[in-house]
Image (tube, rainbow, N blue to C red):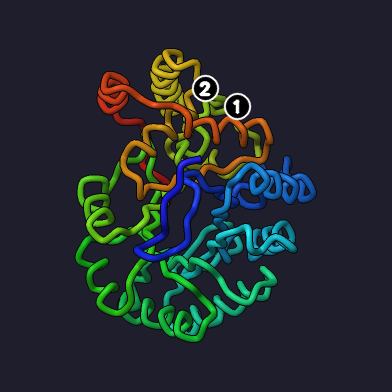
Amino acid sequence: MRTTTLGRDGPVVGRLGLGAMGLSYRYAPGLRDRTKAVSLVQEAVDLGVNLVETAGAYAAGENERLIGEAIRGRRDEVVLCTGGGLLGDPDGGLRPAGCPQALRDAVDESLRRLHVDHIDLYLLRRVDPGVPLEESWGALAEQVWAGKIRMLGLPVVTVQEARDAEAVHEAAAMAAEVSLFTRCGLDDVVPYAVERRIALLAGAPLGRGLLAGPFSRHDDLPADDWRRTQPRFAPRAIRHNYALTQAVGQVAARHGATPAQVALAWLLRLGDHVVPLPGTRASYHLAENLGGDRVRLTEQDVTDLEFLPYPAGAPEA
């Protein structure tokens, strides 16, 4: 697998990481299996994936506990990424929690749940509109100086907000939902990340499963799946978006690849600093996703992909 570094002097990571959210949060809860989830994380590490991303807000900390169990005895093989600045509501929603003390507490809770003595990359998950970004970022910088965190990552912010935060402490990464179906910020955030040698962690790189191709109808989603509440999976929108996935499949057919692999290859082509974080609960999808690193898109492929109509439904929060 191709590699890059996190930040200017950070660790070397594979260009494809593992997003762990869906292992225990939001997606099809009736189909979850903790033992299989732990095994899948371990299989990913066996296959060379060394960047694993989780968050304290995923399933009220259960996602971090799962990752902690999976990497026990293998800590040196993993660049561990988690984050705070969000709290889960009883109805499954998320709300900002960026006050300094809340972030200090969140770091300590993550360390405890993960059973580690430091976190390699800690992401501020959301800018709290009620707290100046510099205060939230400064509280996390204190945790770096205390040895609890190695590097910090920003959420979706403006370029000016990124500059203001970096005046307090440098950012090794920026995390955003980026895919063929979600291209917000590519015109300004990506150039800034390139200029500053900041890794761009592309969350939901397969459009929350749409670009993997299995969903052509709203009813294809399990009845208890959070995505049923999201605009891009609404009955009319999902039909439109499935047609776009089929168009991606036409590009994939030229390479003997799958739409998911082409979607990941398109992200990798944006620059060496871009690290997609696809998630899955199935070994065969894990292998499929890693195959995206082997697809080399042509200029015609890229033109065809970038002129696709915009998908229906706004990006999910």
Residue at left offset 43%, top offset 35%: 232
Q: Position of residue 30 (x, y in %)?
A: 73, 42
Residue 65's image quarter?
A: bottom right
Q: Which residue is mark 2?
A: 216
Q: Nearer the viewer, residue 84 or 118?
A: 118
Disc 1/disc 2 C-alpha distance (Å)? 7 Å
Determine whether the residue tagged by mark 2 lies in a helix, strand or loop: loop
- Residue 184 lies, in percent from the top left, at 29, 45
Contact check, label 1 and label 2, Cβ < 8 Å = yes
Amino acid carrying mark 2 in the image: Ser
Horizontal side of 132 relative to 160 (left or right) equals right
Whether residue 86 is visible, yes or no, is no
* The residue positioned farthest toward the right in the image shown: 35
In the image, residue 172 above or below residue 199: below
* Number of numbered labels in the structure image: 2
Q: Nearer the viewer, residue 191 or 239?
A: 191
Which label number is shown at residue 220?
Answer: 1
How far across and how far down the image is residue 140, in percent?
A: 43, 78
Determine whether the residue tagged by mark 1 lies in a helix, strand or loop: helix
Q: How dense is the environment of label 2, judged by Cα within 10 Å: few (below 14), some, or many (20 and up)?
A: many
Q: In the image, what residue type sits under mark 1?
A: Asp
Horizontal relation, residue 201 to residue 196: left or right: right
Please report the residue visible at 62 percent of the width from the left and 74 percent of the height from the top.
111
Q: Which mark is residue 150?
A: none
Horizontal and vertical percent position of residue 176: 38, 52
Any part of residue 268 in sight = yes
